[in-house]
Amino acid sequence: MNIDLDNMSLRDLRDLRNRLDRAISTFEERRKREALAAAQTAVREFGFNLADLTNGKAVRNKAAPKYANPADPTMTWTGRGRKPRWVQEHLDAGKDLADLQI
């Protein structure tokens, strides 16, 4: 992947940096979801489900973050439950929730 940083505008560079920060901050969570999906597929091939192999305790998927704070990409929200302050402030400023999507 070649990105010509020298010919990008400041806005494009900041956008790229924000996207990169989000990708880095969610990398481990994505890998965990991939591992869980692979485990579920492998267990199904043998005719079981993960609950059968985990002493009856169901394995729940943690909701993946859908929104990130542009000022601090480590601050995320799944879209469930109460809105974090940074989301509410964004909405109160007349901006769209879609702007915060990961």
Image (tube, rainbow, N blue to C red):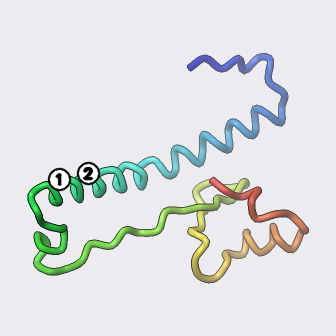
Residue 41 position, x and y percent, is 23, 54
- What residue is shown with label 2? 38
Left or right of residue 100, residue 55 in this image: left
For this orientation, the residue located farthest to the right is: 94
Secondary element under disc 1, as helix, strand or loop, is: helix
Quarter-of-image position of residue 14: top right
Residue 99 position, x and y percent, is 76, 56
Q: Amino acid at mark 2?
A: Ala
Quarter-of-image position of residue 21: top right
Q: Nearer the viewer, residue 21 or 47?
A: 47
Q: Where residue 21 is drawn, which disc sits there?
A: none
Q: Quadrant of the N terminus?
A: top right
Number of residues whose C-alpha sits closer than 10 Å to that of mark 2, classed few (under 14), some (14–19) or many (20 or more): few
The residue sitting at 61% across, 17% down in the picture is 2
Work out whether 17 lies above or below 70.
above
Q: Amino acid at mark 1?
A: Ala
Left or right of residue 97, residue 34 in this image: left
The residue sitting at 14% across, 54% down in the picture is 45
Secondary element under disc 2, as helix, strand or loop, is: helix
Q: Nearer the viewer, residue 63 or 13?
A: 63
The residue sitting at 14% across, 80% down in the picture is 56
Quarter-of-image position of residue 48: bottom left
Left or right of residue 13, residue 101 in this image: left
Residue 77 position, x and y percent, is 59, 68
Q: Are marks 1 and 2 in contact (CB under 8 Å)?
A: yes
- What residue is shown with label 1? 42
The residue sitting at 11% across, 63% down in the picture is 47
Residue 93 position, x and y percent, is 89, 68
Work out whether 23 lies above or below 53.
above
